Image (cartoon, rainbow, N blue to C red):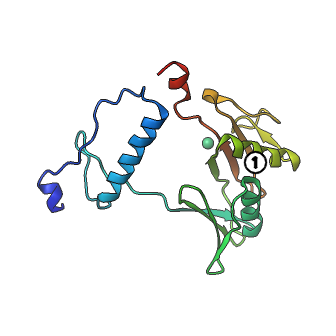
């Protein structure tokens, strides 16, 4: 246990958020929390009531492929991302907007279990990506069980769609308009 922890140090945390704040104040609050978390050593704090804990951050996710070039090229093309980066001749790294990377790797003939990857995008990005899906004639569905061909969903006022990449992984686009429900209700 660290000295700070044994001394009972606690960062100041706003309590009792009603969840009815506007999007700008929520963004400011989220920014403040992120800034506070940057000050905390990783994994140094337990979480008694009201205490902010530094959580582990997802850094990368390996995506198993029969052909990593094919898998990485597909997601980059559909989502409009930067070209993949080669790492050690073994991975093709696709960088995402939140700092997490997808590391596409050849599985060398081993059986590949389909993975599910969901991407949070803006409305404009959804339009562009979904346009590419349709333009390429890629089969897609409104839900992961694939019973609604050619459809998208509108859960909670957002848009979502599922499709399979050439490697068999189930990909998803979502556009949850954070706070839209609250703002629509006058909050
Ligand atoms: Fe999902």
Position of 25 compared to 110: left or right?
left
Q: Which residue lies at the image location 26% right of the left edge and 46% below the top edge?
A: 47
Q: Position of residue 5 (x, y in %)?
A: 17, 55
Q: Residue furthest bottom?
A: 88
Residue drawn at (41%, 42%) of the image: 28
- Residue 72 in the image: state x and y as whole percent: 71, 64
Residue at 39% of width from left, 51% of height from top?
34
Which quadrant contains ligand 1?
Answer: top right
Is residue 43 visible in the rendered structure shown here?
no
Q: Vertical placement of 155 versus 103: above or below? A: above
- Position of 83 with respect to 35 (left or right) is right
Residue at the top extreme? 185
Considering the image in quadrants, where does the N terminus appear? bottom left
- 143 vs 134, left or right, is left
Q: Position of residue 115 (x, y in %)?
A: 64, 53
Q: Nearer the viewer, residue 108 or 170?
A: 170
- For the question of whether residue 118 can be seen, the reply is yes
Nearest the camera: 83 or 145? 83
**Secondary element type, mark 1:** helix
State whether residue 80 is above or below residue 19: below
- Label 1: which residue? 129
Ligand 1 within 8 Å, label 1 CB: no
Query: Crowding at label 1, few (<14), some or many (≥20) Cα neighbours within 10 Å?
Result: some
Outermost residue, front side: 24
- Residue at 32 percent across and 61 percent down: it is 42
In which image quadrant can residue 2 be found? Answer: bottom left
Q: Please identify the quarter of the rendering in which residue 127 is found.
A: top right
């Amino acid at each position: 246990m660290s000295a700070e922890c044994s001394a009972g140090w606690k960062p100041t945390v706003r309590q009792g958020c009603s969840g009815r704040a506007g999007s700008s104040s929520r963004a400011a609050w989220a920014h403040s929390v992120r800034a506070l978390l940057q000050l905390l050593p990783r994994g140094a704090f337990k979480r008694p009531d009201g205490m902010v804990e530094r959580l582990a951050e997802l850094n990368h996710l390996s995506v198993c492929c029969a052909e990593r070039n094919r898998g990485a090229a597909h997601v980059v093309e559909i989502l409009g991302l930067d070209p993949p980066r080669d790492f050690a001749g073994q991975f093709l790294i696709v960088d995402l907007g939140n700092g997490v990377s997808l590391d596409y790797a050849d599985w060398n003939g081993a059986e590949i279990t389909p993975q599910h990857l969901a991407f949070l995008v803006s409305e404009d990005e959804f339009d562009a990506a979904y346009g590419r899906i349709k333009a390429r004639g890629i089969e897609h569905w409104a839900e992961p069980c694939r019973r609604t061909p050619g459809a998208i969903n509108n859960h909670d006022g957002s848009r979502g769609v599922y499709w399979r990449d050439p490697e068999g992984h189930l990909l998803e686009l979502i556009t949850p308009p954070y706070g839209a429900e609250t703002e629509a209700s006058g909050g």
